[in-house]
Amino acid sequence: ESSLTGEADRVRKGERTDPILFSGTHIMEGSGRMLVTAVGINSQAGTIYSLLNSVNGNTTTGKAPERRNVKWNEVRQNGNVVEPQEKLASTDAKRKPPKVKIRVKEMSVLQLKLTRLAIQIGYLGVAAAVATVVILVIKFCIFEFVHKQESWQTSHHLKQLIHFVIIGITVLVVAVPEGLPLAVTLSLAYSVKKMMKDNNLVRHLDACETMGNATAICCDKTGTLTTNRMTVVEAHIGEKVVFLSDLMNGSYCHAMDSFFLSKLELAIALNSSYSSQLLPPKTAGAIPIQVGNKTECALLGFLRMLRKDYAVIRQNHPESEFLKVFAFSSVRKSMTTILLADGGQSLLCLTKGAAEIIISRCSFMMDDRGNLTELTHEGRLAYVRNRIEPMAKKGLRTIAIAYKEDPISTAEKQSIDDESAWLQGLILLCVVGIEDPVRSEVPLAIRNCQRAGITVRMVTGDNMETAKSIAIKCGILNNRARDSPDAVMDGREFNRRIRHPLTGHVSQELLDAVSQHFFCHKILGITILKIQRKPETKKM
């Protein structure tokens, strides 16, 4: 549901738990049948688009049509909805034509100020025009009737009085700044033209004015600050550490043992969803397009850096050959695939998952030469302390890849469904560090915002260490403020601060206090878990 929420985490769907599927989302694994209950403007994506294209939440034709609730007992096996004719007639009778609401465009801050200024100038213009007419009339009367001692002559004196009134009207017309709105419109249009040169399409002119008044920007991490393209940047194979530069030039893959490389390519290509693929780019010279799970696509890209084609391996081993697949879940934090190997003489168990969990179940470690080293309990703790934890501090997602191969006679003694038995005595192949790289243009853009007096904050659903690392790379957070308690706040702490300690309900006063605290102290980073599902964070 990353197209709606911005998060790449998989969401489990079922008949009893979260049965609603949204249009525009992708099915990562599994199969099933669904009933379409809403399309177009009635879907979740359609509701979002209609809200974006409307004013005050209403479209030009009023509110969006109400969704029709379909009861399961009204559905036949072929999917057709059956309703009595009298029910349809009563529904049509109750249905009223939608009321057309006139769209009233709200004035921006600058327009309100200019309107207020124009009214004040108008008042001054009226006062100046009245004063001018009165002064001219008094001066004329004194000069004509007192000084010259002339009598009233309608043809002559009335003409002069009308001339004075015209002068007053002229003063009033000149005082009205009719060119001011045009000057503002031209300046905003110039701003729009400059933004188009930066590939920013602005639909409304007042949006430039709104952005000009911004003092703080809260932006998402995944796909906004980063490329949303997971990439393997570091690999630990045995005692060696291989970096991205070594993988890109292809110098390291030739030094690997063929047996080790064969097991590694099987563990990556087969022990992943076949819907995860690297498609050819649309333009020549561009990077491949990642489809499916981003972490699995990163591992497939790692396999390509080793000059191996995962598609050929999958063709030789279709999914029908798999005996058992333990899909990845947030509980087990690993994925395991069991299949026949060596012409059916042995069972091959391929697994990958969180590095700490997989390493705790490994008894041996294989280096790039195919040599095995025993992993004791102290050795596993030292491996995690010296290799996994430093990668986590750099903001890398650590994935361990392991395997186990047992003869068919030995494997038949244990159940194929006993996952815990299969995940014992594993052989560790490698541990990779996966990173979502920061966009190249982001650090410069953040520095420009900070020079302009705009505070940039990051809002993400990732873990704390990863958020800090990305914030430092972007320039949002500096190394001195990394460990400051006021620099980063997670969703649990935010939720605690905005809820009343006695009732547990969200308090508007506490929410305002948290907002004022962050704005006054110029806090540079905010981490809020699952912000898309917390309505209390909207004001932030």
Image: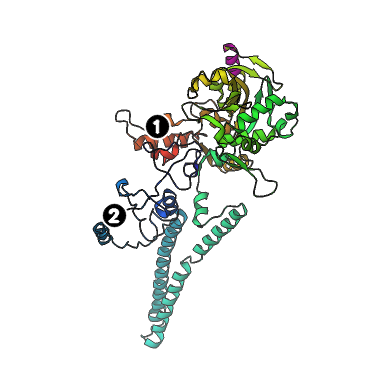
Q: How many marks?
A: 2
Residue 82 placed where, x, y %?
A: 31, 53
- Nearer the observer, 20 or 391: 20
Residue 530 placed where, x, y %?
A: 45, 36
Q: Nearer the viewer, mark 1 or mark 2?
A: 2
Residue 495, labelled with which disc? 1
Secondary structure predominantly adopted by residues drawn in magenta: helix
State which quarter of the image contains the C terminus.
top left
Residue drawn at x 36%, y 48% as measured from the top left: 77
Q: Secondary structure at mark 2?
A: loop
For disc 1, the neighbor class at 10 Å (few under 14, some 14 to 19, many from 20) is some
Q: Is residue 68 left or right of residue 240?
A: left
| Picture quadrant of residue 107 | bottom left
Stretch in magenta: 377-385
Image vertical order of residue 90 relative to residue 350, above or below: below
Q: Is residue 511 left or right of residue 441?
A: left
| Picture quadrant of residue 311 | top right
- Residue type (three-letter) at the residue carrying disc 2: Glu
- Nearer the observer, 497 or 351: 351
Residue identifier under label 2? 83
Q: Secondary structure at mark 1?
A: helix
Residue 336 placed where, x, y %?
A: 54, 27
Mark 1 vs mark 2: which is more N-terminal? 2
Q: Is residue 233 left or right of residue 114?
A: right
Residue 206 placed where, x, y %?
A: 49, 56
